[in-house]
Image: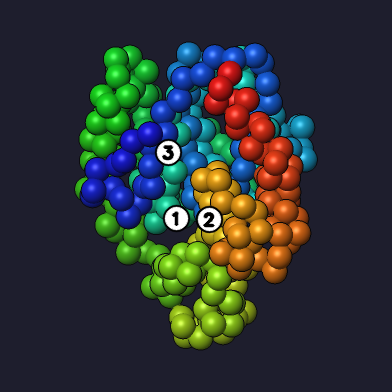
Amino acid sequence: MGRPHRALRPFLREYVGYQLSNAPAVHHGVPSAAATVILAFDDPIDTAWKDDPSSRASYWRLACGLHTRPALIHTGGRQHGIQLDLTPLGVRALLGVPVGALATTMVSHDDVPLGIDAGVHERLAAAPTWARRFAILDAALIAALTTYGEARVAAVPSAARDGWRLLAASAGRLGVGELAAATGWSARHLHSRFVAEYGVSPKAAAQLMRFDRARALVLRGMPPAQVAAACGYADQAHLTREWTRFAGQPPRHTLAELTQFEGG
């Protein structure tokens, strides 16, 4: 795992490098409040939405916006690449489109205006260390940010930007009415602006943020009942229902899959 250069941190949460060899398996890719770019080495990533087998496709460079359903990743026994987790502003600044343009879809990275081109991808695949790969990414993305980023970020309506920031600061626990009052928009207008910019409603964005926090706490070993209370769920059963909806399986199955996947 790598931390992006400080100039990129408002736009990019982390770099995750992976190189795994294990038995062929299907891994659940879960929703998040971050958009995803995956740069595959050696073999392309083979993935589809869990509820839509016809969506299955292979990508060397994948871009995916915010979504509320799991994806199935067919590992084929080997995976090697880098995942980038972008904030919504980061999608505008570094990929050149609002994250809403990528809502609920997976596309080839070649279909976005900016980002990582084929030449940078080749250099990443050939680099001898993860540290060198992260440095190559830093340089390429800082160049994109310097050239295009400020103007693209400025195009986001301030209330939409403030609304996301306030929701994130509350880890998704701020109610839609409170959020509307804080932005100065009506609940209806807030909903329409969120969907236009982010591709999800304020309620769905809040649910994704709560799920992000809940998943992090569960993976750290916190008991589910305590996680439910800490993240604003009514009870453990509510947490389990939301987790199953987003992850495609209950928490215990997610943990078992991660153990098998990481230990393979």
Instruction: Label 1: state its secondary structure.
Output: helix
Pointer 3: what residue? 84
Query: Which kind of residue does numbered mark 2 sit on?
Result: Arg
Instruction: Place residue 26 in its image quadrant.
Output: top right
The residue at the point 54 percent across, 74 percent down is 174
**Is 173 placed above or below 17 here?**
below
Distance between mark 3 and mark 1 Cα atoms: 13 Å
Asked whether, in this view, residue 102 is left or right of residue 123, the answer is right
Which-is-in-front pick, marks 3 and 2? 2
* Residue 138 seen in this snapshot: yes
The nearer-to-camera label among 1 and 2 is 2
Which sits in the foreground, 110 or 139?
139
Image coordinates of residue 212 in percent, x first then y, are: 54, 53
**Amino acid type, residue under disc 3 in the picture:** Leu
Q: Nearer the viewer, residue 160 or 113?
A: 160
Q: Position of residue 222 (x, y in %)?
A: 56, 51
Whether residue 196 is visible to the viewer of this picture, yes or no, is: no
Considering only order in the chain, which callout, 2 or 1, is on the residue closer to the N terminus?
1
Type of amino acid under label 1? Pro
Residue at image mark 1: 88
Q: Residues within 10 Å of mark 1 (few under 14, many from 20)?
A: many
Give the class, few, some or many, for how many residues have Cα within 10 Å of label 3's Cα (few <14, many ≥20).
Answer: many
